[in-house]
Amino acid sequence: MPQKGLFTQGAVVLFEREPALDELEEALTHFTIAVRNPAHEHWELSGPSLLVPFRPEHRGAVAIDIVSRVWPDHMGDPKGDSMLFAAWSMGHFGPGAFPGGLERAMQNSWHWDAGPAQVDRHKAFVRIRTSYVFGAKNDDPVFPPDYDPREELLFNTSIARAILTAPGALCYFNPNGEMLHRLDSIEECLDEYEPGATLPQRLWCNVRLIRLTDHEPWMLMDTVGMAQLDVVDHEALFPDEYEPSEVAGFLRNIADYILQRGPVIKNGDTASGPGGVDWQAFSRDEPIYKPPRPVLRWVPLDGSKVPPALTHPPGTVH
């Protein structure tokens, strides 16, 4: 799975037809266009593109390129589609993208029922990728010494917001947080944000609910995409007697707390949560549900017996 390196942030705008560079440039009137490039010989690496400076003192820029095909959700394989697989593994489709991400975003578009139908209409997409390696030498650092993922993610999103006004634009897709948005919901999130306030994580990071059919009545809820902000994701295991909306709020609040305070929650720590009981955190290198990533797994300390296959160590949580 790719990680931050060649690209540090990535977003996508899906289009019902292939847009022209001129149309994108017109939508980006309020941004500086430094370079206009033809397509690379391999579309997986870049279609025709524009380069917008971002922190140019550190060679930072946002590459905006057009791909005249549907999003390759399978991301290739080493034998049958090696170029696509290599491009994905280097982060060309987002530093947190994982195969099946668009399908999972459609399945978990709780805030926007019409999202999946918009995705089904797309025939092309525009990638928005932030990097600090344009023109870099071999020994140049990949990240600025004062790297700030919040600043660059807000800038990356502001470009996506502008591109969504271009003719034929359908919706925003964040492959790193498996999230879909229409233009007005992005504007709502960004307009509510004030510098120094809690970040609009619901803009970039999804919360998903999965019924564990092999382990009923247990359910799984998780966040995906917090790595964009260089913090850990969370997942909660709980019996279906708990109200999912309360569990979702709990995970969002815990994520905000870590964004504000840093990695202060350790393996075994507890926090007051849904149901009026404490929930305990367990640090895990792998989650229960894709994509692979480290998580803090939360379970209620209510005496419920967690299925052994879902937790380590197995047995009763008490």
Image (tube, grey):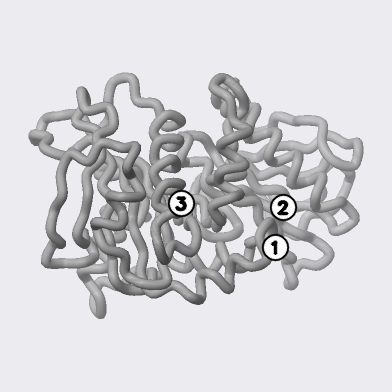
Cα–Cα gap, marks 1 and 3: 19 Å
Q: Which mark is residue 314?
A: 2
Residue type for callout 2: Pro
Closer to us: 192 or 238: 192
Which x, y percent locates residue 101? 48, 63
- How many discs mark residues in the rendered view? 3
Q: Which mark is residue 176?
A: 3
Q: Where the N terminus falls, by quadrant?
A: bottom left
What residue is drawn where x is 56% and y is 43%? Answer: 187
Which x, y percent locates residue 173? 48, 57
Q: Is residue 62 left or right of residue 262?
A: left
Q: Residues within 10 Å of mark 2 (few under 14, many from 20)?
A: few
Do labels 1 and 3 touch, CB within 8 Å? no
Residue type for callout 1: Ile
What residue is drawn where x is 51% and y is 34%? Answer: 231
Q: Which residue is mark 1?
A: 210
Which x, y percent locates residue 11? 41, 51
Q: Is residue 284 visible?
A: no
Q: Residue furthest bottom?
A: 80
Q: Is residue 269 left or right of residue 79?
A: right
Q: Is residue 117 above or below residue 282?
A: below
Which x, y percent locates residue 158? 43, 40
- Circle 1 — which element? strand
Cα–Cα gap, marks 1 and 2: 20 Å
Question: Which circle's residue, 1 or 3, is located before the other in the chain?
Answer: 3
Closer to us: 123 or 152: 123
